[in-house]
Image (tube, rainbow, N blue to C red):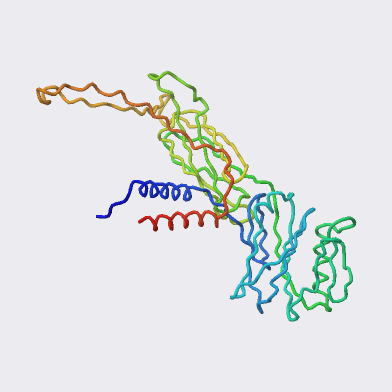
Amino acid sequence: MKYYPAGRNVYRGICLLLLAVALGIPCATAVTLIPGSTAITTIAQGDPVYIQGIATGHPQVGLQIWFIGYNFVKVSTVQVNDDNTYEYELQQSDTAKLAAGEYVVLIQHPMENGVFDVVYDPSSGTVTNVQTGKQIFQLTGSGSLQSTGAVTALMNAIGSQNIDDTFAVVTFYVSQPATSINPIGDLQQGEKFTINGTTNLAAGDNLMVDITSSSFNPTSKTAPSGFSGAGGMIQVVPGNGRLNTWSFVVDTSTFVPDEYLVKVSGVEQAVTASARFDVVCNGSGDTCSIPVTSTTATIAPAATLPANVTTPLPATPALVLTSVPATTQVSPVPAALCLGSIMVVVLLARRLI
């Protein structure tokens, strides 16, 4: 048998605690776009975006990325992997500050000469032809073209017969985070149903659903409160069009007949939606069953207890309050950081075993 000092046991406990925390962190999700795709994609402000594709010829200088939209320009490069694939990330810090509207990402390939023949000069805000040294158009600063005009001018410049570079384009739309709840209607007491809706949040983003009785009020300890409701966290799933969807299953068998309020809140994003529905009697006339949850203490008869044992008084059942998880917005954490946290904790734990 191995003997572990008390301090080592403490460290092991800390490692397990860190692992639990790392697993509980809501990791940021992302939208993946493929250049050349004709699909129309809408993202919410603050959702990261990945641009992925294949660059033949494995250019040593990588690829030049032009990210152009309303009052926004970002030009950078990305390296190509050994298998000719590439991936470029528009981070949350990039998309969170974007105005609503259309955005274009143009991926420029240097082709045979291995040189970007069309480049951006941030000092002057101009786009220049490297071969001739001639300024083609003003991208930023005074006299610059608007986003659509700038994209058209850039594509014309790179597509010129005197330039051997080539490019691929992907377009997406940015809008403020939003979600909606589909109409619910009246429900029979005891009925199971699904609340669903649409959102422009990325698939995998988390939403909190809270359902509460509109008649909920504090009461005395002995009086039934009449409170009923439900709540939980769900994930956004891909939709068939520009919007994604979500759903939440509800069982009204423990609901008292009443009006109920539904609130849907984003966990990673600041977004909310609300709706109402009524639970009505499922019996005849005006008689409705009111579910009541009670705890009964059973006491053994005195004759069955040994003579030298005093019959204990039944303990007063503790009052248990079921609370719906808070809907306070949580700052999302990149997926790589979540995975890294888990790996660090696992390595620490392995060293202590």
**Residue 202: percent from left, percent from top:** 60, 53
Q: Residue furthest bottom?
A: 112
Q: Could you say which is closer to the camera, residue 173 or residue 76?
A: 76
Seen in the picture, residue 45 relative to 147 is either above or below; the reply is above
Q: Which residue is rendered at x = 9% and y = 22% of the image?
A: 307
**As drawn, is 306 to the left or to the right of 253?**
left
Residue 80 image point, x, y percent: 64, 72
Residue at 74%, 55% (x, y): give it: 102
Q: Quick check: 157 left or right of 320?
A: right
- Say above or below: 59 vs 46: below
Quadrant of image for the C terminus: bottom left
* Relative horizontal placement of residue 285, taking residue 150 as reference (left or right): left
202, above or below 329, in the image:
below
Q: Residue 25: horizontal and vertical position, in percent?
A: 51, 48
Residue occupying the point 54% across, 55% down: 337
Picture coordinates of residue 207 (x, y %)? Answer: 55, 44
Farthest left residue? 307
The quarter of the displayed image where residue 35 is located: bottom right
Reply above or below: 258 against 109.
above
- State the count of labels: 0
Viewer-nearest residue: 183 or 135 = 135
Name the quarter where the N terminus is drawn.
bottom left
Q: Quadrant of residue 140?
A: bottom right
- Picture quadrant of residue 108: bottom right
